[in-house]
Amino acid sequence: MTSEIKTFEEAVEFHGHTCPGLALGYRAAEAALQEIRSGRDKDEEILAIVENDACGIDAIQVLTGCTIGKGNLIFRDYGKHVYTFLNRTTGDAVRVAERPDFTLDRIDDTIGLLRSKVMQNTATPDEEKEFRRRSGDVVKKILEMPADKIFSITHVTLKPEEKARIFGSVKCGICGEMVAESRARVRDGKIVCIPCSEHYSRGW
Ligand SMILES: [Zn+2]
Ligand SMILES: [Zn+2]
């Protein structure tokens, strides 16, 4: 296991752009790796449980080496900026939760207004430029802030979860494609995959 922590630039390269969300994920992973005294994951020594699927998760993947494919990045769709990391070798676990008193508005109190204009395509080119510059400043501040001003970081006890499990597959009774048993559903008495078990009204 290597102990050096990847740079923010490496996270940006993976994510495709720089943004405050990525910077927050970067700081969460960095703080966690320091707390559980672990380098980047090579073979599932680290387990990450993330409670949102926003930009920051990409930084967490780059820094910790935890990925969906390896089965050691677990996504729970809670819409919370909370991340839990377990060092499976030592059993050390840490929960990193964004503090309720931390908001981007505290760093730049009017950037939210500008952001919604940019998102709704109503910003002038100058406003867009200004948004990019100020969001760069916010990123810089996030990267320089003490981690405990952003997150509350607590050591927790987790039961070591199993390594990625291998499930048998079954054939979907509607589309005929194979689906992991653990994800199969029953619809009108047929074993089906999730997309087939849901309504077709979505149009794709
Ligand atoms: Zn982003
Ligand atoms: Zn199907």
Image (cartoon, rainbow, N blue to C red):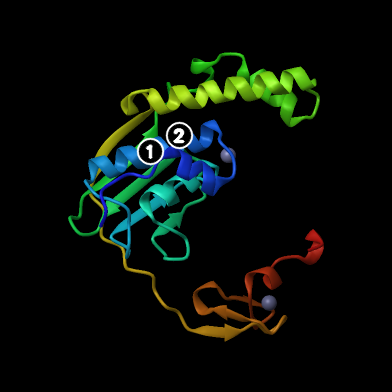
Label number found at residue 203: none
Q: Residue at x 29, y 46 (%)?
A: 4
Q: Secondary structure at mark 2?
A: helix
The C terminus lies in quadrant: bottom right
Marks 1/2 in contact by CB < 8 Å: the verdict is: yes
Q: Residue at x 63, y 70 (%)?
A: 194
Around disc 1, counting alpha carbons within 10 Å, would you say few (fewer than 14), some (14 to 19), or many (20 or more)? many
Asked if residue 53 can be seen in this view, the reply is no
Q: Which residue is mark 2?
A: 24
Residue 18's x, y, as percent?
A: 56, 36
Q: Secondary structure at mark 1?
A: helix
Displayed quadrant of residue 29: top left
Q: Which residue is mark 1?
A: 28
Left/right placement of residue 26 relative to residue 191 reads left
The N terminus lies in quadrant: bottom left
Residue 30's x, y, as percent?
A: 34, 39
Quadrant field for ligand 1: top right
Amino acid type, mark 2: Leu
